[in-house]
Amino acid sequence: MAFDLEVEVKQLTKAEEAEGKLKTSLDEALMHSVLEGDKKTIDEGAVIEEALNRNIHSFTPDLSFEQLVNNFQMAKKILGPKIIRYLTGFDESYVEKNVRIPEFQKEMKKNMDAAVEQMRRKKIIDDFGQFTDQGIQLAALVMYTRELERVLPRGMFGEKLLKESSQYGDRHETRPTKKGDSYRDLAVRESVRMAVRRSHKSLHKEDLRTHTRHKLGTIYIVYAVDASASMKGKKIAVAKRAGMALAFKALSQQDKVGLIVFSKDVHTAVAPTSDFSVLLQRIIRVRASKQTDFAVMLERAARLFPLEGVTKHLIVLTDALPTAGDAPETETLRAISLAKDAGITVSIVGIGLDKKAMSFAKRCTELGDGRLSLVRNLEQVDRIVLEDYESLLS
């Protein structure tokens, strides 16, 4: 999807105050409607976003009407309350109570035809009911503005932290070890030398030395979204929101962000970029399907990073263990090891992981020298993803 006009989002005053100006190429008319609070337009964008999260890619009133009348429970599962409300003009519970009444069916069908026809006139859907590029862009804009409205007042972006030292990046000089240091950064040779100089026959606590690390200029970060079948619906929705917040935050800091969407295969691969519009349009299109193959994702993600010495970090958002491949766990650990050899650190944000998956995720992040964050409340996903990014700066 191509964006025709380049505009500076001057109306997002709070965003500018928090992070500085962020340029993006977006449709001027759509952006204006959303920012001005056009309720009808916002509702249309929100319902397309909901449809994409539910793997629905078109609105056909005849088919939807038949589903509601013939098997309401199945239609309810497929469409969800937001789409039912938008198409019929009635709350889900009201439709369920009256769907067998002929007079109500006529009114419901009339409302559904009118809703779809209006979207067609606005070119949000085409003549076949499929979402157009303009419709998908509208959904992305609505998601984008709502996420900023949600995170900015709550201070999720925090302050701009640009310290020289970092737990990621290259090792440099050493210093005395202190509480909280990673054992992986223990400078064994320097610690032994210190003990010898002090005539100690064994290593004492005060002899221990730790490597310091420094941020290598621009951070290149890739956000990997597990789009397996179990992520469908609410999980995919919050994953998209978190990706949107991450892109806004990191690009405002002049860092670069990429995207990987994977299940059994890699569906989307965007190398770290400064183009917010590219990320916006790719994130909104994420949908769930099939199994989870971490190894394939990790190998592809590693190829997205530049070869030069920059800070390279991968954040993986998932709700399960890898399931695809002959030996998925072994293959995943091997891929993480290769990524680490290439200077890429790996963090995992786990949504509702069971005990076995949690244990494996811990092994992955220890090997990848990253962080493991466990999600208990889906509304906290964006905050957790942003915190992982912030850890690269502190």
Image (cartoon, rainbow, N blue to C red):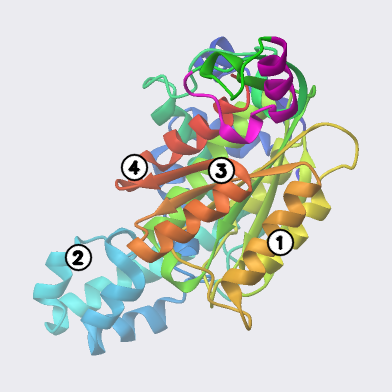
Q: What residue is disc 3 on?
A: 243
Q: Is residue 88 visible?
A: no
Give the spatial CA distance, label 1 vs label 3.
23 Å
Residue under label 2: 92
Vertical relation: 364 (above or below) 246? below
Label 1 sits on what residue type?
A: Ala
Q: Quadrant of the C terminus?
A: top right
Comes first in the chain, label 4 or label 3:
3
- Residue 103 in the image: above or below residue 49: below
Residue ranking furthest to the left: 97
How many numbered marks appear?
Answer: 4
Which stretch appears magenta? 179-197
Q: Earlier in the sequence, mark 2 or mark 3?
A: 2
Q: Which mark is residue 379?
A: 4
Magenta stretch: includes residue 182 = yes
The 10 Å Cα crowd at callout 3, few under 14, some 14 to 19, many 20 or more, is: many
- For the point 49% across and 30% down, the residue is 387
In primary-sequence order, the first of circles 1 and 3 is 3
Q: Nearer the viewer, mark 1 or mark 3?
A: 1
Give the CA distance from mark 4 to mark 3: 13 Å
In 3D space, how far apart are the residues under numbered discs 1 and 4 (Cα atoms)?
Answer: 30 Å
